Structure formats: C-alpha cells, structure tokens
Image: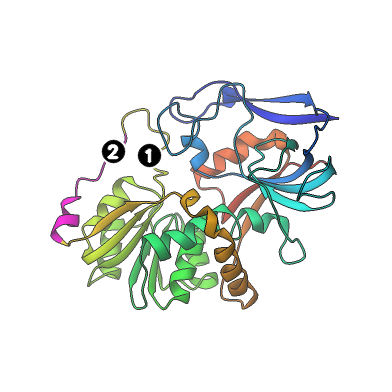
Amino acid sequence: MLNKQQILKKRPIGFPETDTWALESKEVPELKEGEVLIEQHYVSLDPAMRGWLNDVKSYIPPVGIGDVMRAGSVGKVIKANNHPFLKEGQSVSGGGGVQQYVVTDGKGWFPVDTNIAPMPLYLSTLGMPGMTAYFGILEVGKLKEGDTVLVSGAAGAVGSVVGQVAKIKGCRVVGIAGGPKKCKYLLDELGFDAAIDYKNEDVKAGIKEHFPKGIDVYFDNVGGEILDAALTRLRRHARIVICGAISQYNNKTEVKGPSNYLSLLVNRASMTGMVVFDYADRYQEAAMQMGQWIMQGKLKSREDIYDGIENFYPTFERLFNGDKMGKLVLKVKDE
C-alpha cells in the first residue's frame, strides 16, 4: 500500500515557494506489536505551520528537512496489532501530518465520536483551534461578564470561536476581518456586536469608534499595525492575549514589535502569550463545554474544506491570502 506524503524539502525565506514541499509516495510499513495503522481522512491547515518551518528556538522543534509536514489530523484505525486502547474501526484524532496513512504506537492520539460530530469538526471547534480560543479567552484573557472585547482575525478558526465564547459569557464583542463578506458573517451569523473591515476601513479609527471607553480584552491573531492600534485604546487592567501574528510570519526582515507598548504601563495592563499545548490535560473539559454550546445552538462552527493531498500548496496559500472562511481543512482520503 502506497502512502502519499507532503515532504519538507527546504526552509523558506519569506512566503514558502512551490518547491518548499514535494509530494512523495512511500510503502506503508508492516505493523509492529502495539502499533496501529490509521487511514487519514482530513488534515488541519493552520497559520502556525509557517512558524514550524523555521529553524529557530520555539515552543516546538521545527519540522525536519525530509520529514512529513506537521499537521493535526483525523482519520480511522484500519488495522491494529494488539494495541492497548486503539481498536480497528475507531475514529481518532492526533498529529498525523500531511499524509494519507500513519503507523503509530498511539501516543498523542485519542478516539473521537463521529456520531456526535463529523470528522472535520474535530479539527476546528472541537480541535486545536477551539481549544486555543477557549483557554485563550477564558484563562489567559481572564474574561468576565460585561467586558469589552476586540478580536483580530475574527472570521478565522480561532477568532470566530473567541468572539462567540465572549458573547456567551455576556461581553460586547467587536471583530476585525478582511472584506465585507467576512464582516457580514461576523455580524449576521456569529452575533458579533460590530465589525471592522481592515481592508476597507481605518482600523485605528474603527477601534476608537467602537471602544469609546476602551478595550478590556484584546485577542490578537495578527500582530503588526493592528496590535499597535489596539494598544492605544486599552482600559485600566486590560488583558492582551498574544495567540498569533500572521501579519509577520512571512517577513523577510525582522518582526516588527509594537511601538505603543508603554500603554501597558500607563493602564497597568498585561500582554501574555498563549500556547494551547499548555492546556492539553484539560482538552476534554473544553470539548464537553463547547459541544454542549454547539448542541444548544449557541456556538457555530464553519469548516472550509478542500480536496486532495496534491492540492496542499494552493490550500496552504489560503491561510495567508485571506481566501477562506472559518477553519481550513484538507481532505486527503482517496475515494
């Protein structure tokens, strides 16, 4: 049985070029005692993937040259050799990478129930983006009822959940997104109180308009100029959650830091980085709560799914050119 894989071939400078990865086929190895073979159905595409390509110190080692591209995934166990807890026929989620099959001892994999939710949902709201949003806004952002909340990248996989959780908790929420379609999505489908179109509006003026008394919590997915603009409108004891900086990931020069950081001092505010893996022992808690909100109709999830492992690169491009809505997912199972 052949396994199609996207293999990292070189470390990019700036935005990855088409030859950064190569699609290769390798024979699936025989199972050893205690291993399982997983047929992957979907893999997750996330902005963090760009950071995993850089050979620099980070919260996780870089993807090695010649290795399968790292990615979250969900699929089905099609063969098991005396595995202690994974059985044939089970649907499972883990970090299988951008490939069609995975042979594993099961570490980092866990069963998911496709009777409760379809597979792609376990890569979005019930997966890493949902966990990031849940713990980022509630734990790091220390959200409380009545807070005024600003979210950048608000139509994306993380930002869309952040805004909805804040609304569930009784906050006023403003989202920043690119283009009228995405802003309409925030307002009409997700229930945000207001939206700022960074492609067609003055973001700093928009923040000033929608936060006349200032921001209590800013959930930052983009960094750069938008982070700097938000810093100028903080309330006393405001909290900024640094989740990502997608505007800076493909820089060929040094990352640009905020020039308005003294606002943190003046307002006795905090700016804290968050990495979702720190909350791994509490994922089930978050998944149960968000699953309940989904069933109650309080939390909506949107997956933007594209087909074919050979289409990994053009799908990856959508992470950074804005041509997506919600969670970006690649279907890799051959029909």
- The crowd level at tag 2 (other Cα within 10 Å; few <14, some 14-19, many 20+) is few
Q: Quadrant of residue 130?
A: bottom right
The kind of residue on which mark 1 rests is Gln
104 vs 31, left or right, is left
Q: Quadrant of residue 30?
A: top right
Considering only order in the chain, which callout, 2 or 1, is on the residue closer to the N terminus? 1
Say which of 277 and 146 sits in front: 277
Q: Residue at x 48, y 25 (%)?
A: 12
Residue 180 appears anywhere in the view: no
Question: What is the magenta range?
Answer: 255-266
- Mark 2 — residue? 256
Q: Residue furthest left?
A: 266
- Mark 1 — residue? 248
CA–CA distance between discs 1 and 2?
7 Å
Q: Residue at x 25, y 57 (%)?
A: 270
Q: Residue at x 64, y 29 (%)?
A: 68
Could you tell me which secondary element the residue under label 2 belongs to?
Answer: loop
Residue 69 appears anywhere in the view: yes
Horizontal and vertical percent position of residue 90? 80, 53
Compared with 309, 204 (above or below) is: below
227 vs 328, left or right, is left
The kind of residue on which mark 2 rests is Lys
Compared with 227, 169 (above or below) is: below
Horizontal and vertical percent position of residue 181? 52, 60
Q: Is the residue under label 2 in contact with that under label 1 (CB below 8 Å)?
A: yes
Horizontal and vertical percent position of residue 78? 84, 44
Say which of 218 and 287 sits in front: 287
